[in-house]
Image (cartoon, rainbow, N blue to C red):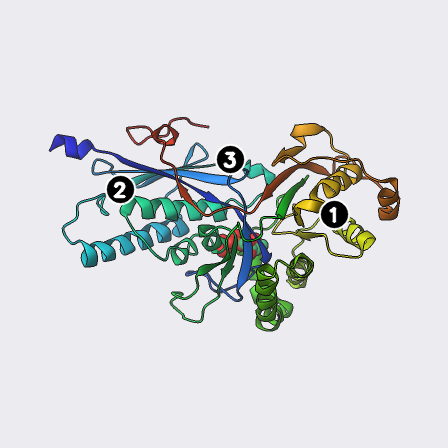
Amino acid sequence: SDNDHRTITRVTCTAPVNIAVIKYWGKRDEDLILPINSSLSVTLHQDQLKTTTTIACSRSFREDRIWLNGKEVDISHPRLQSCLREIRRLARKRRNTDNPTSEVTSVSYKVHICSENNFPTAAGLASSASGYACLVYTLSQLFGVEGELSAVARQGSGSACRSLYGGFVQWKLGERSDGKDSIAEQVESESYWPEVRVLILVVSAEQKSVGSTSGMHTSVETSHLLKYRADVVVPGRMEQMIGAIRQRNFAVFGELTMKDSNQFHATCLDTYPPIFYLNDISRKIISLVHRYNQHYGETRVAYTFDAGPNAVIYTLQEHLPEFVQVVCHFFPPEVNGAEFLRGLPVNLTPLSEELKSEINMEPTAKGIHYIISTKAGPGPCVVEDPNLHLLDADGLPKKSA
Ligand code: DP6
């Protein structure tokens, strides 16, 4: 009937960002996005950082379309096409086996996709992980696909497969050439180690750095250190890291996190031509963390850096207030208060003169734009409130950028 023709189904979901403590860098298959080593990350809480995606579906839609942060973009992007194709394949498979006559949300209907982040892309925070995880999760809800979704999200962006789970997540490299065993698995949930806290230090970056995809391609082609890392170093580190998490041993967790970040950036330097992601501010943060830990004679705070100069700090709740004060003292902000320290509130306490003088660093004004304070959080969620759909009843964006 005419009514059926015009029926529009809408589903909205959210998905989190994740930050690796054992880094993924290098592919053995660039089309399927299969890595050369396993990796492990912490899923961040969606109250601070998330992607929201609405997908509408109707017999009346003439083509698949996508809007990102208010702007329509080209749907023909190969990685987008891979995710759409793989979810539709899973949906058909499920229909044929479980419910051959079912007519719920036809897989053959075209979709309208609208996605936005609650954090600025300009902050240089990876949005591809939460973005592809959210796309795949929302499609799966729309078409009633259940089960292993991480191998689909992985084909959008490698790190996206880890955003399908909350807490501490590993991406096992797998050994099959079809990638069916290159999937993400939860190591422990976010409630297992609730004392862990995360700070994102958004560093003022002048130029845009080399993207992950092209950077790791050049690294695989030219760096012998990367091959050594993947074959010899990472397997042992994955085991140690999983053990540290299970035992809630921050000293081991933190030290491995820093060493793995440093080795990743060393493989970037070993790449030819070399890739530089860290800047002067990044290096000052590294030095500050080591001086702070040195003062206490234990690893209380750990840093990690991805393909850019921003630092992500892992620490425990009990050390957070003092370390935030240390950061504010050595990187005096342009603006104070809530503008500078965003996210989960921190109870600030005065700094001791002794600690300041022992750290013995020259303060760098305005080196850090702002701080996002957060913690580990859950995986993707369905948004039930229809008012929160990003697409209207006709399947078009409610607002444009
Ligand atoms: C440094 O997942 O962005 O953040 O698979 O090519 O999309 P593609 O790369 P991407 O790489 C992430 C690299 C990293 C480390 C990590 O998240 O493990």
Q: Is residue 55 left or right of residue 92?
A: right
Q: Which residue is mark 1?
A: 285
Name the disc covering residue 254, or none.
Answer: none
Instruction: Count neighbours of disc 3 (C-alpha within 10 A) and say few if under 14, some if 14 to 19, many if 20 or more.
Output: few
- Residue identifier under label 2: 110
Q: Is residue 147 visible?
A: yes
> What residue type is disc 3 on?
Asn
Residue visible at 88% across and 44% down? 354
- 1 or 3: tag closer to the N-terminus: 3
Farthest residue to the left: give it.
Answer: 1
**Disc sitting over residue 118 in the figure:** 3
Please rate how many residues cluster around mark 1, counting C-alpha atoms within 10 Å: few if below 14, some from 14 to 19, many from 20: many
Q: Residues within 10 Å of mark 2 (few under 14, many from 20)?
A: some
Query: Alpha-carbon distance for marks 1 and 3?
Result: 26 Å
Asked which secondary structure carries label 1, the reply is helix
Task: Tell me how many marks there are.
Answer: 3
Q: In the image, is residue 75 above or below residue 91?
A: above
